[in-house]
Image (cartoon, coloured by chain):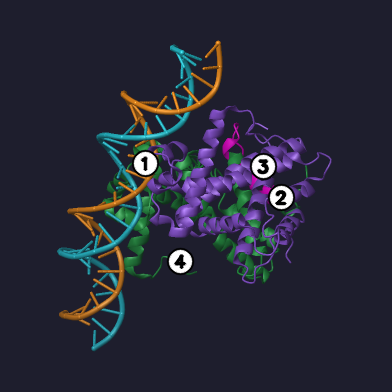
Chain colours: A purple, B green, C orange, D cyan
DNA sequence: ACCATACCTTGCCTGCCGCGCAAAATTGCG
DNA sequence: CGCAATTTTGCGCGGCAGGCAAGGTATGGT
């Protein structure tokens, strides 16, 4: 894949690290202080780079935060490409999606990174100033997802409606499942929600 | 409906007018000059209000532009509510959607407002600084759409996955159809694209 | 018809942001 | 080891978002 981190030169590796560090710092600070008690300067300081450098990596606070979501969502597309071509499309999509929604699976208390991640997603969904970037990141990931689907189905993302349509619908389904999960008051596992949403999609969304 | 413009007092009427005027001005100026050759001040001047007032209506240039899309997308939900309850869900959805995609239907040359509108959508999709707000507006409209679907299907948007899932999927389908339409080099009518996308959705998105 | 009230508009001001530019530091490579 | 390419940084500017308080205008009760 074109975005591995191996043997791409130490320079490129450093850049990726800085980018990820900035992005995590942005999420963490925004979660604990509230979004507008964090200045871009604070994020830069947290990682130990100059304020100007922060803007070399991200053009806004919001973009920095959403970058975490973007990276995660991209992985679904990568996962889909990794599924055997023989597997039926919807099965492959479901399996690929589930790899990125394996929260709270481990032992009793959810793993700490999950905790932080959940809070991050909550923030992106609830803060108006972040919703746009969040959806934009989702859309960007859907583009890669569409390309993967096109490969698998022998269609062309440029000319055919199909791959973009499926990618968009799957994205919507995953967002709906996530929101449902975040809203559930007695917490529920997320996997069944994701499975259910995709199953309904593949079944033509019949009235229940 | 709760948002009619009749007998809501002159005050409210004026506000709506100003809001729409600002929004149109924002779109028009951004289309003809390019987004970042337009300052929020210019938009205010165009409508004849103070720069400060502009920010009372919209919290950013981008939001002002996307407001046009938002209003239009809201109408689909309203249209859905207007369909008879006896009509099958997907038929009602398709009909409702098509009322807002009746472009280039009239005589030879497309109506001038359509022309302007198309350019506006193109801008929102292509300009990175607008994509986020565009999607955010779509999501807001989908909320109303979900409420309408919930009413019609006897589900609850708070507790059930279904209405949000359908609203999201339909939104994605309409976006995919629109983009396909914008991309088509020998221009094609949009209605068949919308119809096709929704038909595929209701059919469970089978591999073509 | 009038007045009191609530609401909208406006100007002023402050802090922050995004980015262009050029100098300085760092890194990779021959 | 030293050169060239790339990244980081400092500086500065234009612009933006929004708090606050003053002035003006519709509204609804009497």
Closer mark to the observer between disc 2 and disc 4 = 2
Q: Main secondary structure of the magenta part?
A: helix
The residue identified by callout 1 is B29
Q: Which residues are magenta?
A: B182-199
Compare marks 2 and 3 and give the one earlier in the sequence: 2
Tags 2 and 3 both on a single chain: yes
Q: CA distance from mark 1 to mark 3?
A: 35 Å
The residue identified by callout 4 is B3
State yes or no: discs 2 and 3 in contact (Cβ < 8 Å). no
Label 4 crowd (10 A; few <14 / some 14-19 / many >=20) = few
Q: CA distance from mark 2 to mark 4?
A: 44 Å
Q: CA distance from mark 2 to mark 3?
A: 15 Å
Q: CA distance from mark 1 to mark 2?
A: 45 Å
Q: Nearer the viewer, residue A152 or A162?
A: A152
The residue identified by callout 2 is A99
Closer mark to the observer between disc 2 and disc 3 = 2
State yes or no: discs 1 and 4 in contact (Cβ < 8 Å). no
Task: State whether residue A161 is above or below residue B89.
Answer: above
Residue A37 drawn at (x, y percent): 39, 56
State yes or no: discs 1 and 2 in contact (Cβ < 8 Å). no
């Amino acid at each position: 894949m074109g975005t591995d981190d191996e043997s791409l030169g130490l320079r490129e590796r450093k850049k990726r690290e800085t980018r990820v560090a900035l992005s995590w710092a942005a999420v963490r600070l925004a979660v604990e202080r509230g979004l507008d008690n964090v200045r871009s300067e604070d994020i830069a300081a947290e990682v130990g780079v100059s304020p100007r450098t922060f803007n070399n990596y991200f053009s806004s606070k919001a973009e920095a935060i959403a970058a975490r979501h973007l990276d995660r969502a991209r992985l679904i597309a990568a996962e889909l490409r990794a599924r055997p071509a023989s597997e039926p499309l919807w099965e492959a999509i479901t399996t690929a999606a589930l790899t990125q929604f394996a929260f709270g699976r481990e032992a009793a208390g959810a793993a700490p990174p999950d905790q932080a991640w959940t809070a991050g997603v909550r923030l992106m969904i609830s803060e108006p100033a972040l919703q746009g970037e969040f959806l934009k990141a989702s859309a960007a990931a859907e583009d890669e997802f569409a390309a993967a689907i096109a490969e698998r189905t022998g269609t062309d993302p440029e000319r055919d409606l199909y791959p973009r349509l499926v990618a968009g619908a799957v994205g919507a389904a995953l967002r709906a499942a996530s929101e449902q999960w975040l809203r559930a008051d007695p917490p529920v596992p997320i996997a069944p929600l994701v499975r259910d949403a995709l199953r309904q999609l593949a079944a033509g969304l019949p009235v229940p």
